[in-house]
Image (spheres, rainbow, N blue to C red):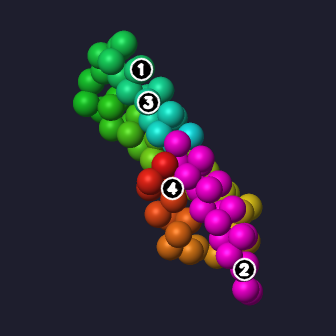
Amino acid sequence: MEISVAGQTYAFMLSLVFGVLIGVFYDIFRIIRIAFRHGRIVLFIEDLLFWSISAVLTFIFIFAVNSGEVRIYILIGILAG
């Protein structure tokens, strides 16, 4: 399916915003980590929880924005955000 340049730009901008939101989500986990010292097992579970939630949200985002088609500009936008 062809996507116009305007549609690609819009998807890229949305992916930048999504990347920022994932960063804020990670900062919340960091604040919790700094406020409460945890053992190694709890840190592992927190990391696993963060990456699992981030992966599911990224999948839902790509499906909603680009009908599930993974495009490099969307991945770059998420990483840049």
Q: Between marks 1 and 4, how big is the CA–CA gap?
A: 24 Å
Reading the image, the residue beneath label 3 is: 27
Task: Say which amino acid is labelled 3.
Answer: Asp
Q: Position of residue 34 (x, y in %)?
A: 33, 18
**At which x and y percent is residue 59?**
61, 60
User: SS class of the residue under badge 1?
Assistant: helix
Nearer the observer: mark 3 or 4; the answer is: 4
Left or right relative to 9: residue 47: left
Which residues are the magenta region?
1-20
The part of the image, by quadrant, that contains residue 65 is bottom right
Q: Which quadrant of the view contains residue 5?
A: bottom right
Please give the residue where the numbered disc 2 appears in the rendered image: 3
* Residue 80 showing in the rendered view: yes
Amino acid carrying mark 4 in the image: Ile
* SS at circle 2: loop
Front in this rendered view, residue 50 or 70: 70
Return the residue nearer the eye: 51 or 16: 16
Query: Which residue is the site of mark 4?
Result: 78
Q: CA distance from mark 2 to mark 3?
A: 34 Å
Q: Are marks 1 and 4 in contact (CB under 8 Å)?
A: no
